[in-house]
Amino acid sequence: MPKFIPPTIVQKEPICALATPPGKGALAIVRLSGKNAYAIAKNITHESLLPRRAHYTAFYDANDGIIDQGLATYFQTPSSFTGEDVIEFHCHGNPLVAELLLKTLCCLGARLATPGEFSLRAFLNNKIDLAQAEAIADLINSTTEQAARTATRSLQGAFSERVNSVLTQLVQMRMHIEAHLDFPDEEIDRQQTTQLCKQLTLLEDFLDELLQQAKLGERLQTGATIAIAGKPNAGKSSLLNVLAQSDVAIVTEIPGTTRDPLSADIEIQGVAVRLIDTAGLRETKDIVEAKGIERAQQALAQADLILWLTDVSSDDSQAIPKEIDVNKVITVHNKIDLQEASSLNDNENIYISAKNHTGIDELIAQLALRLLGENVLSENGDTPFLARNRHVIALQNAQQHLRSAQQRLSSANELELAAEDLRIAQQNLGVITGAFTPDDLLGKIFSEFCIGK
Ligand SMILES: Nc1nc2c(ncn2[C@@H]2O[C@H](COP(=O)(O)OP(=O)(O)OP(=O)(O)O)[C@@H](O)[C@H]2O)c(=O)[nH]1
Ligand SMILES: [Mg+2]
């Protein structure tokens, strides 16, 4: 009996791609998905593949010559990643073999997939929503263990679940309000308005928490750039070397040692951080140093945070130059080994000795606080999900319209305008999961995927 296929599944023309990284390896996986994929696979393997069984088989080219032998696994629609008929061929990891296999698949009617096309089909067939599709790309691109774990949670639907929960509550409220709009004779009374306002407040609190978690998830997804700046000889390169736990930068007692910006990648509480050491800022006639300072200023403008390093033993003025955004600055007072009186750290000032490694743990703790905020990490230090900037913006827009709806309801009882605000809030949340996503945005999101995903 033919298997029941839910009406949402659409099988498009067959596509194929290498699913593993190009190059030599033990194995390479070639993936085929779409209409006729089963028949094409039969031509390649000369076997009648059973669903969800790994078949050890030869792979034949169009002239029945053997290309390789390996495993072929058939995932029957709709129980596959894309929802279509999918066949995975595991061959030996020589790029020529995979190339031959792909060529044969194309001779048999498939075409090479575009970047992200498998995931796009999975989305269009409702196998995953948009936030989950993005989580796949983010998981592949994660550079810290924590980012990878949180991407997996998003992929499993943790983020989408929360967004959908807000959506469900919003839809209920809209139904309630619009029922009154449709039957204007039944005027909404004060008690009902108060009740609606109460529900809106609860929803706003929920959304606010979601937004804070999304911001955290975004930080994990994007990582951060932290620049080290200050006057020449403050100890910037010494601090870079301490934080990177490696002799990345040249350190000398000659002011103006560092010219080009230097970087080192480190991890702070699961956030991938790029540290940038820069040339000391001062007036100079030296052309090379001046060019280094110009580059330092560019690096400072782009950084998420700036460590403004001062030398506590120096009498020179070490004030933060006015072109630096002070909101991004933590002042780090270095060389406290040369000072007798001890000073207390606060959120803007940290006292260290790059030479003796004193105060470095406190500095790292302060950086983590700046990057991740307070009280937002769960007990095991994990974040609930990974998020992107477009998610944060959509949540902020939704929040703004929820607030506006509440004002209209409570102060002026403007039902119609409140309903419109709730509709826009709903639309913004729908953009996250893909319920209301314009085609050009979809194109942009999926084109950033790698081929074969
Ligand atoms: N006593 C002491 N000396 C330090 C400390 N940190 C750095 N120094 C010394 O200060 C001098 C300058 O250090 P660097 O790390 O090269 O300073 P910088 O800010 O990178 O200097 P430029 O690249 O020239 O701008 C070197 O002699 C370091 O050994 C510290 O915590 N205590
Ligand atoms: Mg230096």
Image (cartoon, rainbow, N blue to C red):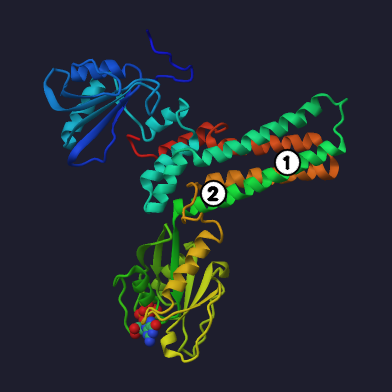
Query: Camera-side residue: 97 or 387?
Result: 387
Location of residue 295 in the rendering, given as x and y in whole percent from the top left corner? 42, 68
The answer to which of marks 2 and 1 sits earlier in the sequence is: 1
Q: Is residue 204 left or right of residue 418?
A: left
Q: Which quadrant is the N terminus positioned in?
A: top left
Looking at the picture, tell me which residue is in the foreground, 242 or 97. 242
Instruction: Say if 27 sits above or below 377 in the image.
Output: above
Callout 1 secondary element:
helix
What residue do we see at 80% from left, 35% from top?
A: 415
Left or right: 230 in relation to 144? right
Q: For residue 120, which quarter of the picture?
A: top left
Residue 254 visible, this angle = no
- Residue under label 2: 214
- Residues at marks 2 and 1, CA–CA distance in whole angstroms: 22 Å
163 displayed left or right of 136? right
Mark 2 lies within 8 Å of ligand 1 (Cβ measured):
no
Helix, strand or loop at label 2? It is helix
Left or right: 38, with 379 as reference point: left
Q: Is residue 328 in sight in this rendering?
A: yes
Q: For label 1, count other residues whose C-alpha is less than 10 Å away and answer few (under 14), some (14-19) or many (20+).
A: some
Q: Position of residue 184 (x, y in %)?
A: 85, 26
Residue 199, label in figure:
1
Q: Residues within 10 Å of mark 2 (few under 14, many from 20)?
A: many
In the rendered image, which quarter is residue 243 located in?
bottom left
How many numbered discs sit on the rendered protein? Answer: 2
Taking the view exactly as shown, the residue that stands out farthest to the left is: 65
Residue 150 has which mark? none
